[in-house]
Image: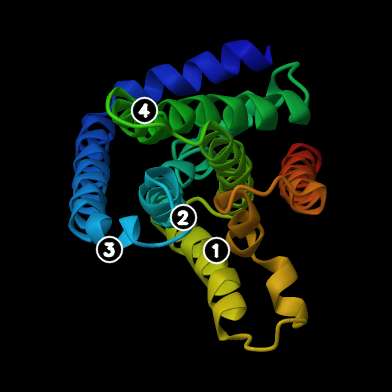
């Protein structure tokens, strides 16, 4: 049932003209950032050649590109999560969905999986562009894989927050604004906290992505993303359960 709901979400996404518009804009931004980074690297390459241990093309281009992708996904994800449950509630189809024999976990995980599959296809643009550099230079595959893994976990955390906020309202626009406010607030709290041991750092998904962005696979950061995502998915299931019981 989770797979069927996920396929339903994917079909509905690709049926929207706005989805194709966002895909085009997203690809244009990534291509512009990639070419700008490549141009900057070629300009400073003579200076880098004089260093004893110069940074490679992967560190110079891939890491900033992946971090830009992470920040763009934070801004973009609320546009897609806003309709997951809020639109069902607005269109009066949520009571029909809740009256079906589907468990709350099937509904939540189905919608979560469908949107994650779409966003993963979207983010494949980043490593695809980077691997075109392999035609002329050596790439650090470990750094790229670390960033890909971190970006998947980060995207899952964004979708989980958006799914929960979407379950709280019948207005998709309010859901989008609420999700963006939560994600941006967590990032802003992390950015504003100057002390290295500030507890605010531990609540920001973008902060935990930084180790992956640097090529470090830290189990603590991975555990944070898993627990963060599971927490908001469980909150969403609880919300739908209350809707089913109390109407």
Q: Secondary structure at mark 3?
A: helix
Residue identifier under label 3:
47
- In contact (CB < 8 Å): disc 3 and disc 2: no
At a point 59% along the width and 54% down the height, the residue shown is 165
Tag count: 4
Residue 156 percent across, percent down from the top left: 61, 41
Residue 192 percent across, percent down from the top left: 56, 85
Residue identifier under label 2:
74
Residue 188 percent across, percent down from the top left: 53, 77
Q: In front of the other: label 4 or label 1?
A: 4
Q: Secondary structure at mark 4?
A: helix
Residue identifier under label 1:
183
Q: Which residue is at the far bottom?
A: 194
Picture layout, residue 88 above or below residue 180:
above
Mark 3–mark 1 Cα distance, whole angstroms, equals 39 Å
At a point 44% along the width and 36% down the height, the residue shown is 91
Mark 3–mark 2 Cα distance, whole angstroms, equals 35 Å
Q: In the drawing, what numbered circle is on residue 131?
A: 4
- In contact (CB < 8 Å): disc 1 and disc 2: yes
């Amino acid at each position: 049932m989770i797979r069927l709901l996920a396929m339903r979400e994917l079909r509905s996404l690709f049926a929207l003209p706005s989805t194709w518009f966002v895909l085009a804009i997203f690809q244009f931004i990534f291509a512009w950032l990639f070419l700008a980074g490549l141009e900057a690297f070629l300009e400073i390459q003579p200076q880098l050649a004089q260093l004893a241990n110069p940074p490679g093309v992967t560190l110079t281009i891939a890491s900033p590109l992946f971090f830009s992708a992470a920040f763009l996904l934070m801004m973009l994800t609320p546009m897609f999560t806003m309709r997951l449950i809020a639109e069902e509630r607005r269109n009066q189809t949520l009571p029909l969905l809740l009256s079906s024999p589907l468990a709350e976990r099937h509904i939540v995980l189905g919608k979560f999986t469908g949107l994650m599959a779409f966003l993963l296809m979207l983010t494949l643009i980043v490593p695809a562009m980077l691997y075109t550099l392999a035609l002329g230079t050596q790439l650090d595959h470990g750094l790229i894989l670390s960033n890909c893994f971190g970006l998947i976990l980060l995207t899952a955390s964004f979708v989980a927050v958006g799914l929960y906020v979407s379950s709280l309202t019948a207005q998709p626009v309010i859901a989008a604004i609420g999700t963006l406010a939560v994600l941006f607030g967590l990032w802003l709290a992390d950015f504003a906290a100057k002390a290295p041991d500030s507890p605010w750092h531990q609540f920001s998904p973008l902060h935990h992505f930084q180790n992956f962005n640097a090529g470090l696979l830290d189990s603590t950061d991975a555990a944070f993303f898993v627990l963060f995502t599971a927490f908001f998915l469980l909150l969403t299931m609880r919300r739908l359960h209350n809707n089913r019981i109390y109407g």
